[in-house]
Amino acid sequence: MQKKQNILRLTESAIMIAFATVLSEIKIAHLPFGGSVTAFSMLPLIIIAYRYGTKWGLFSAGIAGIFQLMLGMNNLRYGTGLLAVFAILLFDYIIAYGVLGLGGIFRGKIGNRQGIEMACGAALTLFLRYLCHVFTGVTVWKIWTPEGQSVLGYSLGYNATYMVPELVITVIGALLICSFLDFTSNDITRKSKNSSVVIPERNTTASIVKISGIFTVFSGVLYSVYNMINAFLDEIGMDSKLLVILFAAVVAGILIYGFGELIQIVYNISKKSDKQ
């Protein structure tokens, strides 16, 4: 039985690392001096960390970091010395991706609601990855800082232009996928009898409404961030309308999602009444 579990773990991890590598090449936005917004490429590694624990998650994410290093090997040539190359190797690849292995650190600590737990893990790990890139920004890539700007300020701003939308995309992805799958069971497609994860009986209408709310927020954030990136790179002032659009999208998304929750609550009450 243990051998079968180990084989399952290795197989799943290999598949998820492959998914993460392929998704990292699907770039929604790409910045000229490095960094990009991808299609949920961090999520597979966070799922493995949540499913099998921090130690295995760190190992799997570290392997994924090595693959990313192999794909970005040309970036090492920009290192002006041995320490610079070492910093790029660690903080732009191995550690930057390795921290994703902490994605399951909240498992069982927020009422066994895996969507919220995984979303919190995603937010934490991508913030840590952001700090890694900021570090190389002020140590290795500082030569690209525009004249007259603070090195730290430029690094914080530049790396935020792709890491913030990447964080939002990953958190939304975690919430969505956990609405349908139970990553604590052997068969992730359904809730295990021994699982304590809370997965309420779903109402299709409520699910569609809530997903619509999430994508409303997602679309507003993506649109605003995309235009903010262009404004940042072109060194022009940011249009205040973007903040209005972003605020409106977030408020509308929250209201739509809340309406979906209301539908779900009414559905649960009616089902409970029927059983009685």
Image (cartoon, rainbow, N blue to C red):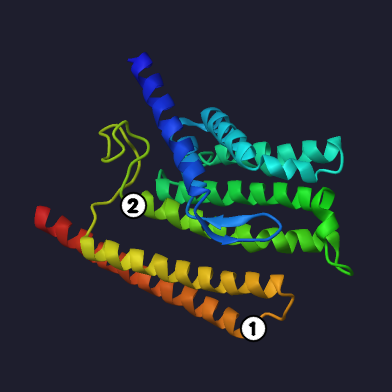
Residue 79 percent across, percent down from the top left: 81, 43
Q: Quadrant of residue 82?
A: top right
Name the residue tied to disc 2: 179
**Nearest to viewer (mark 1 / mark 2):** 1
Asked which secondary structure carries label 1, the reply is loop
In the image, what residue type sits under mark 2? Ser
Tell me what residue is drawn at x 45 percent, y 31 percent: 14
| Looking at the image, residue 52 lies above or below residue 133 | above
Closer-to-camera residue (274/99): 99
Name the residue tied to disc 1: 239
In the image, what residue type sits under mark 1? Asp
Using the rendered image of the protein, determine whether residue 105 is visible from the camera's viewpoint: yes
**Looking at the image, which residue sits at the far right?**
148
User: Decide: marks 1, 2 in contact (CB < 8 A)?
Assistant: no
In which quadrant of the rendered image does the N terminus lie? top left
Residue 76 percent across, percent down from the top left: 75, 41
Dot 1, how many residues are within 10 Å of its Cα: few (below 14), some (14-19), or many (20+)?
Answer: few
Q: Quadrant of residue 3?
A: top left
Tell me what residue is drawn at x 30 percent, y 68 percent: 209
Using the rendered image of the protein, determine whether residue 98 is visible from the camera's viewpoint: no
Q: Quadrant of residue 64?
A: top right
Residue 241 percent across, percent down from the top left: 59, 85
Tell me what residue is drawn at x 48 percent, y 48 percent: 23
Tell me what residue is drawn at x 64 percent, y 69 percent: 229
In which quadrant of the rendered image does the C terminus lie? bottom left
